[in-house]
Amino acid sequence: MRVNIDEIKEAGIDRRWDLPREALDAIVLGDRSGWRASGGAHVEARIEKLDRRVFVKARVTAELAGECSRCLAPIASRLPFAFALTLVPADEYDEQESVAAEDKAHHPVAGSFDPQHAEEEAYQGKVVDLDPFLREQVLLSLPEYPVCREGCKGLCSVCGKNLNDGECGCDRKVPDPRWAGLAKVKLT
């Protein structure tokens, strides 16, 4: 989705667009996260401008499919998320970065970025492409450890049976290696 900055008036503009399943699939498969697109993504954005800065507030809903991290059962997820972003002209952004670097030289702070500018990105020209920012936000919103349900018991570590279907009877008790030497002791 491209936005011409000159089209943004004082009241701002609202934009809605759909990201096709293939485009969403390319985003999540490229990350090797284990997710696939089961549908597209719908984006609703409010775009406002103050001087040369552009403010984007967006709500996204993405249809995804994957596997449970515990039992490997297929799961479907409707992933809603929102994000806010400030787009700063590249020349102003570079100026901020050099001031921040100079300030860090005089006042070292733990961390590798200035938290004040964490939600800012640079842009060049009169047309801003929002797709790279959307890609980043989709990847940041993916659940790291998806489960089919909260109480999922997973797979048996011995035979591989899905423990949600019932117990398998395997002895999954792992002995403490510190006591392993005592198993060899014979009592007379």
Image (cartoon, rainbow, N blue to C red):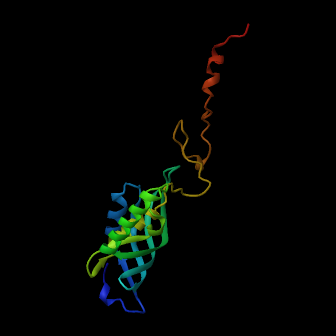
Residue drawn at x 31%, y 68% as measured from the top left: 22
Residue 100: % across, % down: 41, 64
Residue closer to the observer: 120 or 19: 120
Q: Is residue 57 visible?
A: yes
- In the orientation shown, which residue stands out farthest toward the top? 188
Query: Which of these two is toward me, 158 or 186?
Result: 186
Residue 81: where, in percent of width, then height? 49, 71
Q: Pinpoint residue 24: horizontal percent, then vertical percent.
A: 36, 67
Q: Vertical placement of 184 versus 118: above or below?
A: above
For image coordinates 59% across by 40% down, the residue present is 168
Residue 5 position (above or below residue 157): below
Query: Is residue 21 visible to the viewer in this orientation of the structure?
Result: no
Q: Residue furthest right?
A: 188
Percent of width and height locating residue 127: 27, 80
Q: How many marks?
A: 0
Residue at the far front in the pictured view: 106
Q: Quadrant of the C terminus?
A: top right
Q: Quadrant of the N terminus?
A: bottom left
Give whichever of 39, 33 is nearer the camera.
33
Q: Nearer the viewer, residue 89 or 23?
A: 89
Left or right of 148 on screen, residue 60: left
Figure quadrant of residue 125: bottom left
Is residue 188 rendered to the left or right of residue 47?
Answer: right
Identity of the residue drawn at 34% across and 72% down: 122
Q: Residue 185's image quarter?
A: top right
